[in-house]
Amino acid sequence: MIKGNVNIDAKICKGCELCIIACPQDALALSSHFNDKGYRYVELIYNVCTGCTNCALVCPEAAITVYRQAKPAKKEKVSTE
């Protein structure tokens, strides 16, 4: 399975929750803390990100960056002949 990592810029996040709705893995939630502008920001709560980028695509503030981990190389089948 492909894994990803989400980086959320809490300073510019306005907590609109669009990314939470868009995440098929339910990995995002609103923080109980507030940023400097007084908004509750979104944070990654479960490390189940697949790198689908749905959250970043719907973010109106462009506060989310998604990083995908490289696919593991397939092992070549070794013949025993």
Image (cartoon, rainbow, N blue to C red):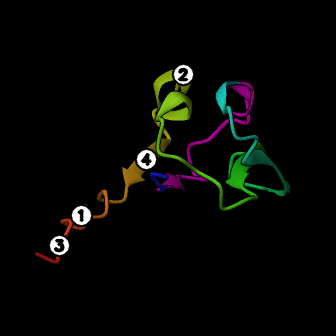
Q: Amino acid at mark 2?
A: Val
Q: CA distance from mark 1 to mark 3?
A: 15 Å
From the viewer's perspective, is 29 left or right of 80? right
- Disc ID at residue 73: 1
- Disc ID at residue 25: none
Which segment did they paint magenta?
4-21
- Disc ID at residue 78: 3
- Point out the tag, 1 or 4, that comes first from the N-terminus: 4
The part of the image, by quadrant, that contains residue 76 is bottom left
Q: Nearer the viewer, mark 1 or mark 3?
A: 3
Q: Secondary structure at mark 4?
A: strand
Q: Amino acid at mark 1?
A: Ala
- Point out the tag, 1 or 3, that comes first from the N-terminus: 1
Disc 2 marks which residue?
58
Q: Secondary structure at mark 2?
A: helix
Q: Residues within 10 Å of mark 1 (few under 14, many from 20)?
A: few
Q: Nearer the viewer, residue 17 or 4?
A: 4
Q: Amino acid at mark 4?
A: Val
- Point out the tag, 3 or 2, that comes first from the N-terminus: 2
Q: Is residue 19 magenta?
A: yes
Q: Nearer the viewer, mark 4 or mark 3?
A: 3
- Point out the tag, 4 or 2, that comes first from the N-terminus: 2
- Disc ID at residue 66: 4
